[in-house]
Amino acid sequence: MSRLSISAELESAADRIADISRANLQIILRRAALMLRNVAGVPLEPATDDALNSIAAEMGIGRSDLIQIVLREWLEANAYLPVRMIDEESETEGSA
């Protein structure tokens, strides 16, 4: 299960706390605990950490989303991942 699905499941359980069985709640909480236990952060130098936080705030996205974008683009630029094809006729947000 992904973090997003576990998060959604926890929110749903919180919304219907009176109706959920003890066993189901126990399962949901154990999954969440397992997910949290297995989350490993990447220690960064303070300057790198500050730069990521500033850029993420400037772009209006989460820090983890920014890290995923940067990592994916680096992997593509260095031929570790195939380059994604962009449909030139599709509309995009922003300006060039």
Image: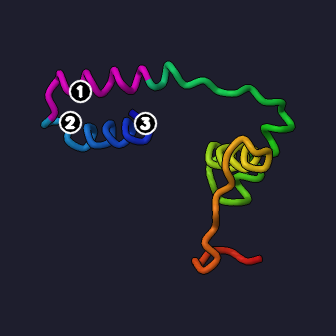
Left or right of 45, for residue 5: left
Residue drawn 78% across the image and 37% down it: 49
Left or right of 2, for residue 78: right
Q: Amino acid at mark 3?
A: Ser
Mark positioned earlier in the residue sequence (3 or 1): 3
Residue drawn 60% across the image and 23% down it: 40
- Distance of mark 2 from mark 3, alpha carbons? 22 Å
Q: Residue 17: which numbered mark, if any? A: 2
- Distance of mark 3 from mark 1, alpha carbons? 18 Å
Q: Residue 42 in the image: state x and y as whole percent.
A: 70, 27
Q: Quadrant of the N terminus?
A: top left
Q: Which residue is mark 3?
A: 2
Would you place residue 39 above or below residue 8 in this image? above
The residue tagged with tag 2: helix, strand or loop? loop
Q: Foreground: 85 or 38?
A: 85
Q: Amino acid at mark 2?
A: Ile
Q: Residues within 10 Å of mark 1 (few under 14, many from 20)?
A: some
Q: Residue 25: which numbered mark, if any? A: 1
Q: Quadrant of the C terminus?
A: bottom right
Q: Residue 25 in the image: state x and y as whole percent.
A: 23, 27
Mark positioned earlier in the residue sequence (1 or 2): 2
Q: Foreground: 17 or 34?
A: 34
Q: Which residues are magenta?
A: 20-34
Residues at marks 1 and 2 touching, judged by CB atoms closer than 8 Å: yes
The residue tagged with tag 1: helix, strand or loop? helix
